[in-house]
Amino acid sequence: MRRGANGGFSGKAGSVIGSSWKSIDYIKGLPKKRTKPMTQDQLVQQARFAVLTRFLMPLTPMVRVGYGQIQSHRATAMNVAVQQNMGRAVVGTYPDFSVDYAAVRISEGRLLGGGTVAATVAAGVLTVNWSTDVNDLMDSNADDLVYIVLFQPEIDEFMSTPTLPTREDGEVDITIPDHFLGGKGHVWIFFSDRKAKRVSRSSYLGELDLQ
């Protein structure tokens, strides 16, 4: 709704609802009540969607960075992340779907990644190493920000660094909370420039014993 007779509006007006997103005004009809039961295909898609969104929602701040520049004029970062991960990261058969952690991408972009990246755990500390090299052709910089995610599926919790390290640091130690220890953990890493306008594709660093 670029230019309405009365301009944009918010809320219900008769049979339509007005709203605004990214300074663009929209109107849509009121939702109709479902009278037919869902088809099997709809139930399958709904279940796949629920499994993936439940996993990604706690990562919303990182997803906003990781997918914030893709189709940003017409979709939220979370919508794009779900769309791009649905086909590759949800596995299993209905109704027993699960997330393939190794296939999940928290970010998607062309910024230079971390080269040969490694993650290890010892004495309750997660250590992640990456290359400090920069590349003029790929427009990377020493002050690029580094995002690290640790997921512990047994307790269904995520954690990251208290503050973001930079590419030039090359390494970070993260103290793992006691209640994370004793199980398995999955780790991802990606990079962005200082303004979060350019990002790298995230890398899955594997499943680690959290001891």
Image: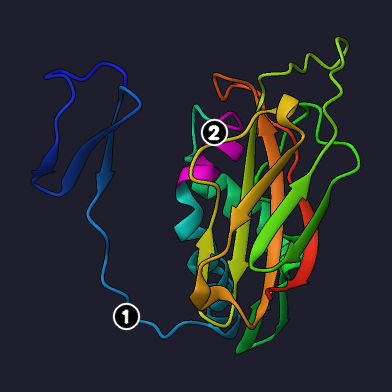
Q: Is residue 159 left or right of residue 33?
A: right
Give the residue furthest to the top.
136
Q: Give the structural element (helix, strand or loop) at label 2.
A: loop
- Nearest the eye: 203 or 100: 203
Q: Can the viewer see residue 196?
A: yes
Region of the chain picked out in magenta, as a range: 61-71
Is 64 contained in the magenta span?
yes
| Residue at the disc numbered 2 | 68
What residue lies at 54% left-to-right and 68% top-to-bottom?
49
Give the percent coordinates (x, y) of residue 47.
54, 78
Left or right placement of residue 19 versus residue 10 in this view: right
| Residue type, mark 1 in image | Thr
Compared with residue 116, is residue 204 higher up or lower down, i.e. above or below? below
For this rendering, which residue is in front, 49 or 105?
Answer: 105
Residue 67 seen in this snapshot: no
* Residue at the image point whose x is 23% and y is 37% from the top: 19
